[in-house]
Image (spheres, rainbow, N blue to C red):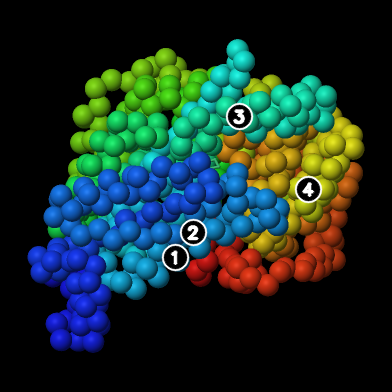
């Protein structure tokens, strides 16, 4: 019995039947699985511009497989488009807006399953969170990465554009030259090339078992993507008949696999928050920060895609992708985990023909012996913080410097432009976390990109309770927990304090006595902030702490 088949004779059944008859549903259709095609799409951004075409193909595929598709559109945030207003505060809250958007439409309509077209950073996490919350058959389709183009004799992609901005203030690049780069930095639809948050989360969706095996990463609009679209459309209909729901897939062991893959690929730091959020929505009793801390000890960096190293995301796709990484970790991952394919991880891996070890190294011959991501603790981060150690040079894994404190990324950028940031500084960007922002300030990541462009990212460290972009590089610590707005120790750092960051020993400390820190915390008063009326104000009232992935539910 499908839940979408309402009780004949009831009011809901009658009015719904009338509407759907008008839409052209046949008598047979009423008996078929009704499937939401979650088209998180907008014409504002190149990340989404191909999704309407994909949605049509998915709907055709579902009909061919014996289901009835209904397209559902949600809010569609892009980190590089919907970031301009209010210092980018909308970006993280947009993830949870998508989750609730899906709940309203899919649960409200009692649809039987959903296929989610994931693209820009927040979409794959949001889609998995919604699947975990509603627990109806759900399959994720990562809709691929974009490509750059030639600017004169040099290849340029969005990563180059992002990082070149800071060269202008240094006089190393003119606005005209940057304009030329922007003309060719993106030449196809899809998510930012490189191991940013979007590609990381596409790969981790596969590692969790929520996509068909072999899909991530994938070039947008490639024939291979369209093959996966057809297969995924068929598969969601089967999953409904099999009652294969997300909570059968999203087990603690599946999250351990995902964390192992995140560490091996040097994935985006934002994966910590997003995996925590998916686990929280699945109501799993697991602390993902602690899973990272445990698994990091046995992990090394097997993949060296930009911004970590010289390889491109297409190299990873051709070398074997997420499955290739899992194959290299075969002796460590949990192979018995069920996936949306209906088979286990181990069974999926048996189908992988070969892995190009020049790109996806083996654990015996890694790019780096230590993993890409580390969790730091210390008097500044009692509940943890994350750093992408692989985006800092190997000889810069220890940094001690002087605090320069800002409550806004924009103010930090102004200070950089005025020459007020010097080598040896530790730039503190606080009040930038989910509650403090409210919503994490994306300007923190813009500051880091400017720092890189100014050639100072090896001489200046940045620490924040907000987020970085997965494309940032340098000595960076983000998601310091508890955040300053919750009274975390970051709130009481003073200009001129000495701060020590040790990525090898996984420590972050402000070098003051315990007594001094305690006194400052006792005297601390929360910053009064005028939050404009609207979604951000609602978000601030309900957002949970970082170690629960900053979701909106208790
Ligand atoms: Fe959408 Fe980068 S802005 S993936």
Mark 1 CB near ligand 1 (8 Å cut): no
Residue designated by label 1: 101
Does label 1 or label 4 sit earlier along the sequence? 1
Task: Say few, some or many: other residues with alpha carbon within 10 Å of mark 1 (under 14 / 14 to 19 / 20 or more).
Answer: some
Q: Which residue is mark 3?
A: 183
Q: Quadrant of residue 497?
A: top right
- Classify mark 3: helix, strand or loop: helix
What x and y, as percent, mark residue 60?
22, 49
Q: Gap between marks 2 and 1, in whole Å?
A: 8 Å
Asked whether, in this view, residue 273 is left or right of residue 86, the answer is left
- Mark 1 and mark 4: span between their CA atoms? 31 Å
Instruction: Tell me whether circle 1 and circle 4 mark residues in contact (CB < 8 Å).
Output: no
Task: Mark 2 and mark 1 in contact? Answer it, CB < 8 Å.
Answer: yes
Give how far apart the Cα atoms at labels 4 and 2 are. Answer: 26 Å
Q: Could you tell me if residue 116 is visible in this image? A: yes
Q: In the shown orientation, is residue 410 left or right of residue 478?
A: right
The residue beneath circle 4 is 410
Disc 3 to disc 2, C-alpha distance: 27 Å
Which of pointers 3 and 1 lies earlier in the amino acid sequence?
1
Q: Nearer the viewer, mark 3 or mark 2?
A: 3
> Label 3, label 1: how many angstroms apart (C-alpha)?
34 Å
Q: Which one is earlier in the sequence, the residue at label 2 or at label 1?
A: 2
In the rendered image, the quadrant that contains the N terminus is bottom left
Residue 504 picture quarter: top right
Find numbered disc 1 in the image and state the secondary structure of the residue it sits on.
helix
Which is closer to the viewer, label 2 or label 1? Answer: 2
Farthest residue, direction left: 28
Q: Residue 195, position in %: x, y?
A: 51, 33
């Amino acid at each position: 019995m499908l839940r979408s088949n309402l009780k004949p004779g009831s009011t809901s059944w009658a009015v719904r039947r009338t509407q759907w008859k008008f839409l052209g549903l046949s008598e047979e259709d009423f008996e078929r699985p009704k499937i939401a095609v979650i088209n998180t799409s907008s014409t504002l951004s190149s990340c989404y511009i191909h999704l309407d075409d994909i949605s049509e193909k998915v709907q055709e595929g579902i009909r061919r497989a014996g289901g009835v598709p209904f397209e559902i559109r949600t809010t569609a945030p892009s980190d590089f488009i919907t970031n301009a207003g209010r210092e980018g505060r909308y970006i993280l809250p947009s993830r949870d807006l998508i989750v609730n958007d899906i709940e309203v439409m899919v649960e409200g309509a009692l649809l039987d399953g959903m296929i989610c077209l994931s693209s820009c950073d927040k979409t794959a996490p949001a889609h998995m969170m919604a699947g975990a919350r509603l627990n109806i058959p759900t399959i994720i389709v990562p809709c691929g990465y974009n490509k750059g183009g030639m600017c004169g004799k040099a290849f340029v992609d969005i990563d180059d554009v992002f990082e070149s901005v800071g060269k202008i203030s240094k006089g190393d690049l003119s606005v005209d030259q940057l304009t030329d780069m922007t003309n060719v930095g993106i030449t196809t639809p899809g998510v930012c090339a490189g191991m940013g948050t979007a590609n990381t989360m596409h790969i981790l969706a596969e590692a969790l078992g929520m996509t068909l095996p072999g899909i991530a990463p994938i070039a947008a609009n490639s024939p291979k993507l369209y093959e996966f679209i057809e297969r995924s459309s068929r598969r969601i209909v089967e999953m409904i008949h099999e009652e294969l729901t997300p909570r059968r897939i999203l087990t603690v062991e599946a999250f351990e696999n995902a964390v192992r893959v995140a560490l091996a690929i040097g994935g985006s730091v934002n994966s910590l928050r997003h995996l925590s959020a998916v686990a929280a929505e699945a109501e799993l009793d697991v602390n993902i920060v602690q899973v990272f801390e445990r698994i990091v000890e046995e992990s090394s960096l097997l993949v060296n895609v930009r911004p970590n190293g010289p390889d491109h995301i297409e190299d990873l796709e051709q070398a074997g992708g997420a499955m290739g990484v899992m194959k290299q970790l075969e002796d460590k991952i949990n192979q018995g985990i069920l996936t949306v394919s209906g088979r286990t991880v181990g069974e999926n891996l048996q189908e992988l023909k070969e892995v190009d070890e020049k790109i996806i190294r083996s654990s015996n011959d890694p790019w780096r012996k230590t993993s890409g991501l580390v969790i730091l603790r210390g008097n500044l981060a009692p509940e943890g913080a994350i750093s992408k150690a692989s985006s800092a040079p190997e000889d810069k894994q220890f940094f001690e410097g002087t605090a320069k404190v800002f409550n806004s990324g924009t103010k930090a950028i102004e200070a950089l432009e005025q020459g007020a940031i010097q080598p040896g500084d530790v730039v503190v960007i606080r009040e930038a976390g989910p509650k403090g922002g409210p919503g994490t300030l994306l300007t923190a990541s813009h500051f880091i990109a400017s720092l890189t462009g100014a050639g100072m990212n090896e001489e200046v460290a940045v620490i924040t309770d907000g987020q970085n972009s997965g494309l940032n590089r340098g000595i960076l610590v983000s998601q310091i927990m508890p955040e300053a707005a919750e009274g975390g120790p970051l709130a009481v750092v003073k200009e001129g304090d000495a701060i020590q960051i040790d990525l090898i020993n996984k420590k972050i400390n402000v070098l003051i006595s315990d007594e001094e820190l305690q006194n400052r915390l006792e005297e601390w008063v929360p910053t009064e902030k005028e939050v404009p009326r609207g979604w951000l104000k609602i978000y601030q009232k309900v957002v949970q702490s970082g170690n629960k992935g900053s979701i909106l539910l208790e």
